[in-house]
């Protein structure tokens, strides 16, 4: 198979590239490196089946040769990054999605969109099933991300209906693991970075807001299964095991011998108070559910960030 993956040098994209290259497929990887990192795909560059194109998906994308599947992941996915780049975020969700859908249409390929749990906004239904339409502030600070992803979902469905493209929409919930950017502001790398530096953990609000963290290998498995399915409507992919951010901070503290303290900072605006995927649909149609417990995934992630810190000291 020949895959095109946008956002390929990002956290999730690079793991997806690994998965396909390891199974003997070809990958054309696109990334403009605004938040992705060349280091994430460096180990693949010498592989004959792997091609990297540094390109912004907001400009027309031309691929030569056949394409079997298009995976559109390119997006500024961390709240800090999308708040810093709201227009680029809106553009990659809208124009970027259109350009990648065009690649699928021209090549007769299938298309998978990585959408987001942010489509549910600050949810009034808990846990969130795919049938819930969400509670999104359309003009709030987060709207650049939430609304562009909701638009991307609508555009994907329109391409399916008008051009009969085989499309899939994954609603990705909080995912973590090696290759997250240490400084992208998201809570998992932020707490690990703070603990490694001997700093206090910055808990926003009173820490009672909840999240559910899915380990990267589980998510990649879910994306691959979804891309092989006939399901055209959105499917939640995430780990339903929910905890408060304060509990999460305490888990990190225990990992570091209770040394890090906690400082409370203001809660960002429109920060969802609860989030937990209802994954019954993914279980039913994909036979998928996460396998990696937070305990195990955190060990792998902390080891990765420690190895980066050691490499930094050596260089
Ligand atoms: N958060 C926090 N401290 C941090 C970073 C994030 O308490 O240093 C909180 C944030 O307010 C949110 C949760 O952790 O409630 C998850 O934030 P993240 O940025 O990882 O992603 P989100 O789930 O909001 O998209």
Image: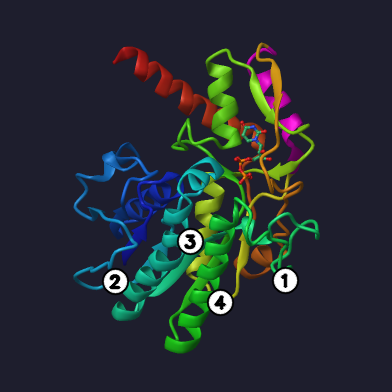
Q: Is residue 250 magenta?
A: yes
Q: Which residues are magenta?
A: 242-258
Ligand 1 position by quadrant: top right
Q: Earlier in the sequence, mark 3 or mark 4?
A: 3
Q: Which residue is at the front of the view, 54 or 168? A: 54
Whole-number angstrom distance, CA of label 4 to CA of label 2: 20 Å
Quarter of the image that includes the C terminus: top left
In the figure, 197 relative to 91: above or below? above
Q: Is mark 3 within 8 Å of ligand 1?
A: no
**What is the distance, in whole Å, between disc 2 and disc 3 at their CAs?**
16 Å
Q: Looking at the image, is 140 positioned above or below residue 196?
A: below
Residue 168 picture location, percent across and down: 51, 71
Numbered tag placed on residue 224 in the rendering: 3
Q: Which residue is mark 4?
A: 232
Q: Which residue is mark 2?
A: 67
In the figure, is residue 294 to the left or right of 50? Answer: right
Residue located beneath label 1 in the image: 131
Tell me which numbered mark, 1 or 2, is placed earlier along the sequence.
2
Q: Main secondary structure of the magenta part?
A: helix
């Amino acid at each position: 198979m020949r895959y095109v993956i946008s956002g390929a040098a990002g956290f999730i994209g690079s793991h997806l590239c690994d998965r396909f290259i390891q199974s003997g497929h070809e990958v054309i990887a696109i990334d403009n490196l605004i938040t992705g990192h060349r280091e994430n795909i460096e180990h693949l560059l010498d592989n004959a089946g792997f091609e990297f194109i540094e390109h912004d998906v907001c400009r027309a994308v031309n691929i030569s040769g056949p394409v079997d599947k298009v995976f559109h992941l390119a997006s500024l996915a961390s709240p800090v990054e999308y708040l810093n780049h709201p227009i680029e975020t809106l553009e990659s969700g809208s124009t970027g999605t259109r350009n990648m859908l065009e690649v699928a249409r021209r090549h007769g390929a299938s298309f998978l969109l990585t959408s987001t749990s942010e489509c549910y906004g600050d949810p009034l239904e808990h846990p969130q099933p795919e049938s819930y339409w969400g509670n999104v502030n359309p003009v709030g600070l987060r709207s650049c991300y939430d609304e562009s992803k909701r638009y991307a979902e609508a555009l994907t469905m329109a391409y399916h209906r008008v051009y009969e493209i085989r499309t899939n929409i994954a609603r990705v919930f909080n995912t973590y693991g090696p290759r997250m950017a240490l400084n992208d502001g998201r809570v998992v790398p932020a707490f690990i970075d703070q603990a490694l530096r001997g700093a206090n953990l910055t808990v926003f609000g009173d820490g009672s807001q909840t999240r559910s963290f899915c380990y990267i290998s589980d998510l990649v498995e879910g994306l691959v299964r979804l891309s092989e399915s006939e399901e055209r409507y959105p499917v939640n992919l995430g780990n339903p095991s929910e905890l408060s951010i304060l509990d999460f901070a305490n888990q990190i503290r225990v990992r570091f011998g209770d040394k890090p303290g906690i400082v409370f900072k203001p809660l960002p605006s429109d920060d969802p108070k609860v989030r937990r995927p209802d994954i019954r649909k993914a279980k039913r149609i994909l036979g998928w559910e996460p396998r990696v417990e937070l305990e195990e995934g955190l060990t792998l992630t902390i080891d990765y960030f420690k190895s980066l810190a050691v490499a930094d000291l050596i260089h």
